[in-house]
Amino acid sequence: MTTLSERISQSAFDGSRLRVVLLLDLYDGAQNRFLEVYEHLRKQVSSVPGHISDELCQSIENPSQWLITSEWESAPRFLAWVNSEDHVASVQPLHGCVRDTRSLRFSVMRGKAEDAAPLVSPSPRRGDGVVRHALTFTVKPGSEAVVAELLSSYVSPHARVDESTRLRRTSLFMHGNRVVRAIEVEGDLQAALSHVARQPEVRALEEAINPYLELDRDLADPGSARTFFTRAALPAVHHVAAARPESEGLGRHALFYPAKDGCGMALARLLARQDELAVDDPTSPVEASTVFERDDVVVRLVDVRGPLDARPALALGVEGDHKAAVLARLLDSAKDGVPITDQEISRFLARSEMRLITDRRSPARA
């Protein structure tokens, strides 16, 4: 059996406290306004469930650089807030003060909380140097074919961002009128996203898609663009991959799970537990899985040997006693009964599978 430290794994579900570090670069002359906005924001955040503390710091070398650190009871608590519309609204006033931001999130592995026992988290997980992220948005019904054609025909940007950052893979899927773009980056995710956004071919694609979006955006307006991409962000809350070498002929699939109101994180946790068991099983066709979640939108990306429906329950993430019933209770679309038989689960799986638009891998490093 593969141990936690042997498999490739990242997770928001390890139960540890979370430390969030936000680096900010302010516009000249914006410091007083920034401090006013921060005080208002701090009072709002202090009442958010799971928030423990926060601090504001200013650089002693460059006064325009500031740092906000906060501590949370767990990653799910923080993600529930940062992915909410309340958060989008609360940070809007910062846009006029801040030239650039960078957010870093860390599990607290060792330490001692004030007036508490020492903090000791589970064993460190083994990474692979890859950051996984996704964007999701919806297009106007009836425009799906046009949007799919635009997304499949664009010219890929150059993979190399800088000496330490490289685009590794981009996978685009659609489910009805919902688009999901999943990316894998070696190095700095923010640098990669900024690099991609500057490329003429990508800017042309985004402009071409604009008329078909359900949520309007103006890419010429930095505030409008920032708000759109904030809402579109679909963070990876769990990734796991087998420690064994990657098999030949792996197929990449995406499954869409619309959760009931308030059930997105619970659904993501259910799928994460199933996938950790799956990649530890040498007979399992699932080699890797990434679960993305924002509010009630859950998307699971799986790399599978052979046909997706060879083991339908495993592919759907519900292999084992009662797991299909639990999934059905969490899904907003589960109105036609609980899938029990292999045939029912296969139909459920087919309905959940997203259509692959394009899957582009960058050449290996020289």
Image: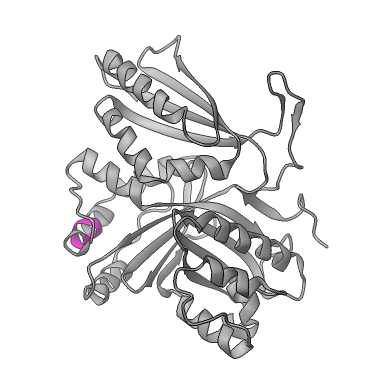
Quarter of the figure with the N terminus: bottom right
Q: Is residue 245 left or right of residue 159?
A: right
- The residue shown at (31%, 70%) is 177
Colouring: one colour
Total count of labels: 0
Q: Can residue 164 be seen in this view?
A: no
The relative height of residue 251 versus residue 5 in the rendered view (above or below) is below
x, y percent for residue 126:
70, 48
Main secondary-structure element of the magenta-colored stretch = helix
The relative height of residue 354 versus residue 123 in the rendered view (above or below) is below
Q: In this view, does 226 lie to the left or right of 168?
A: left
Q: Is residue 207 magenta?
A: yes
x, y percent for residue 157:
35, 55
x, y percent for residue 224:
22, 43
> Hey, which residue is sitting farthest top in the picture?
60
- The residue shown at (67%, 60%) is 273
x, y percent for residue 76:
56, 45
Quick one: 182 or 45, which is closer to the camera?
45
Q: Can residue 71 be seen in this view?
A: yes
- The residue shown at (56%, 61%) is 267
Q: Does the magenta stretch include residue 309?
A: no
In which quadrant of the rendered view does residue 272 lie? bottom right
The relative height of residue 18 versus residue 114 in the rendered view (above or below) is below
In which quadrant of the rendered view does residue 180 lie? bottom left
- The residue shown at (29%, 70%) is 153
The relative height of residue 160 versus residue 287 in the rendered view (above or below) is above
Q: Is residue 102 left or right of residue 148?
A: right
> Hey, which residue is sitting farthest bottom in the picture?
343
> Hey, which residue is sitting farthest right in the picture?
1
Range drawn in magenta:
205-209
